[in-house]
Structures are given as structure tokens and as C-alpha cells.
Image (cartoon, rainbow, N blue to C red):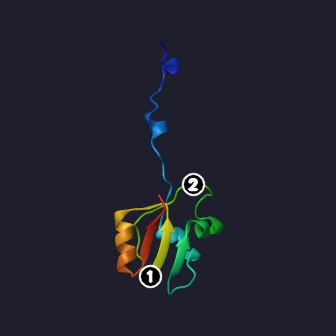
Amino acid sequence: MPLHMRRRSSRASRTRSVPSTRWSTWTSSRPSTRGGEVTVADLVAKGAVRKNQLVKVLGTGEIDVALQVTVDAASGSAKEKIAAAGGTVTELV
């Protein structure tokens, strides 16, 4: 059978892709330089992520203010850095 007619693996369609965001893309969505709350709705309103998609925060970069972050997922290093700055992470998924 020709290659273009062969059934392709459906493994790629079964994996869930979670868009990720970095500190630099949402520093402007912080309420102030003293910290505050950051949610998925805030990130969508600022245009940092798309609506109706899962959001994962990565731990690249530095953070120096206490934030209360509510997102779908967060990497281990992001949780550590947010906690070290005095903030909290709430995962929705």
C-alpha cells in the first residue's frame, strides 16, 4: 500500500498538549509590583494566552513578588520559585 494511504498512528491525537506561558509574557498582568492574584482570565484579557485553552506556567526566569497564581498546570520549578517569593499556586486540573 502506498505511504499516503497507510493509517497513521493516532498516538499523537491522544496526547494532551498544554500551552505554556513564561513569566515575561504575563508580568504586565500583575496587579502591582507588590504582588497580587493572577488567573487564567487575567492572562486571556491581556492576550498572553488564548481563550478556552489549558495554561501551564513554566519556571523559566526570575520572580521577586508574591503572587497567588491560579492556572491549569504548573511545572515543579515554577511552583518552587513562586513559593520562594512568598506566593501560592493553585492548579485547576
Of residue 72 and residue 25, the one placed in the foreground of this image is 72
Tell me if mark 1 has few (under 14), some (14-19) or many (20+) residues whose alpha carbon lies within 10 angstroms of its own: some
Vertical arrangement, residue 36 with respect to residue 13, above or below: below
Q: How many marks?
A: 2
**Hey, which quadrant is residue 11 in on the image?**
top left
Q: Determine whether, in the image, residue 24 is placed left or right of residue 49.
A: left
Vertical arrangement, residue 68 with respect to residue 71, above or below: below
Q: Which mark is residue 52?
A: none
Query: How far from the left and from the top, in percent, is residue 31?
Result: 58, 81
Kind of residue at badge 2: Gln
* Callout 1 touching callout 2 (CB < 8 Å): no
Q: CA distance from mark 1 to mark 2?
A: 25 Å
Q: Residue at x 65, y 68 (%)?
A: 45
Q: Could you tell me which secondary element the residue under label 2 belongs to?
A: loop
Query: How far from the left and from the top, in percent, is residue 65?
Result: 45, 83
Query: How far from the left and from the top, in percent, is residue 92?
Result: 49, 62
Q: Residue at x 62, y 64 (%)?
A: 44
Kind of residue at badge 1: Ala
Tell me if mark 2 has few (under 14), some (14-19) or many (20+) residues whose alpha carbon lies within 10 angstroms of its own: few
Q: Residue at x 58, y 67 (%)?
A: 43
Q: Which mark is residue 53?
A: 2
Q: Which residue was labeled with disc 1? A: 66
Q: Earlier in the sequence, mark 1 or mark 2?
A: 2
Of residue 82 and residue 62, the one placed in the foreground of this image is 82
